[in-house]
Every structure is written in structure tokens, then in C-alpha cells.
Amino acid sequence: MQFNVKRESSPMETMQQQAPAMEAPTMEMPAMEEPVVNAYEHPGCDDQIGDVHVVLKPGPESKIEDILHKTHAFGVHQFDPQTVHGVYGDEGEANLVGEGAIRELHKHLTKMEKKKDTVIERIGKRIHLLQKEINNHMKSANERPEEADAHHVLAQRKMDSIRELRGKHKVVKESKRTLPVKNKE
């Protein structure tokens, strides 16, 4: 058994049925050039922001040209948020912030290199002191053979300490960098 249900047509269907069919134009239309679209333009969006300036976190060798990028609000996604120092609407402000970030990084790196120099110096002094103590233990062991075993044990402990310190010395020395020379402009 089938039911005949009469369905009402929607207003859009009614309009399409009543409107006369549009005919294709007979005359040729002149070819229009494609408008140049901004690479960051988002169709249908009212852009109230415009260009923005992204300042990336600087590295030891960074120059301002390397960390300052002009983009659009829709182009910011191309940057990893972990690498962005800041986003600014004014290029001058972005430039100042970028130069400040580079200066701060260089101050920090210089401070770290000075600390490494201090650590290397202290380790060297400690190694020298332990070597003197080892020599004293060996001398005492020769002078008093009855206490030689005790002096040899102490000397061995100090030699183990020296090995550890030399390992640390090597690690710190390998981590040292030569900092780029600042251009005085």
C-alpha cells in the first residue's frame, strides 16, 4: 500500500520554477585580469589589524634582520610559538624590542662564559691542591713505612677526585663558545 503525500515546495523551489531561464550572453566578454591578492588576505574578512611585526627569539649569531619578520595576522601561524619573542603592530617598536633582545642575550652569554672561566679556574686550583696533597701522602708513606697503606688509600681517593674533576673540566671547557663580536655602529 502506497500513500500519496503531497509535499509543499520550498520558497526557493517556487522561485526557480517561476523565474525565466537565464540565457548565456551572446557577445564575448573581455578577459579580465586577476586582481593581485595579498598573500595574507583572507577573503570575506574585514581586516582591522593589517601588517604585524613578529620578533623571534635571538640566537648567539642573530642579527636584527634575522629575527624581525613582517607578516599579517593570518600569516602568524607560520611561526612556532616557542620561538616568538613578541608580536607588534609598529615596526619601530618591533625593531627596538628585537635589538634589546639581542643585547640581553649577548649580556647573558657573556656572563655565562665568564662563569665557565671561573669554574675552569677553580677546578684547576682544586686539582693542583689535590696533587700537592697526594705528593705529601707519598712523601709521608716513604718517611713512615708503617703508615704507608693508610697514606696510599688517601692518595688513591684524591686521585679519584682528580679524575672526576678533570672530567668536569673537560665538559666545561668543551661547552665554551667564542661570542660574536658586536659591531659598533
Image: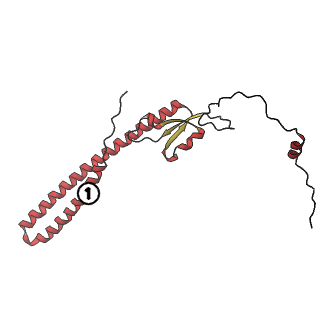
Look at 11% across and 70% down and name the residue there. 148
In which quadrant of the rendered view does residue 167 lie? bottom left
Instruction: Indicate the colouring scheme.
Output: secondary structure
Q: Identify the secondary structure beneath mark 1.
A: helix
In this rendering, position of residue 72 left or right of residue 144: right
Residue 16 vertical placement versus 159 (above, below): above
Look at 36% across and 43% down and name the residue there. 109
In this rendering, position of residue 1 left or right of residue 138: right
In which quadrant of the rendered view does residue 90 lie? top right
Q: Which of 37 and 177 is in front in this view?
A: 37
Q: Provide the residue designation for mark 1.
A: 167
| Quadrant assignment for the N terminus | bottom right
Look at 29% across and 53% down and name the residue there. 171
Where is residue 24 drawn, in percent x and y?
79, 34
| Quadrant assignment for the C terminus | top left
Instruction: Please state which amino acid type lies under the numbered disc 1.
Output: Gly
Where is residue 118 drawn, in percent x and y?
28, 47
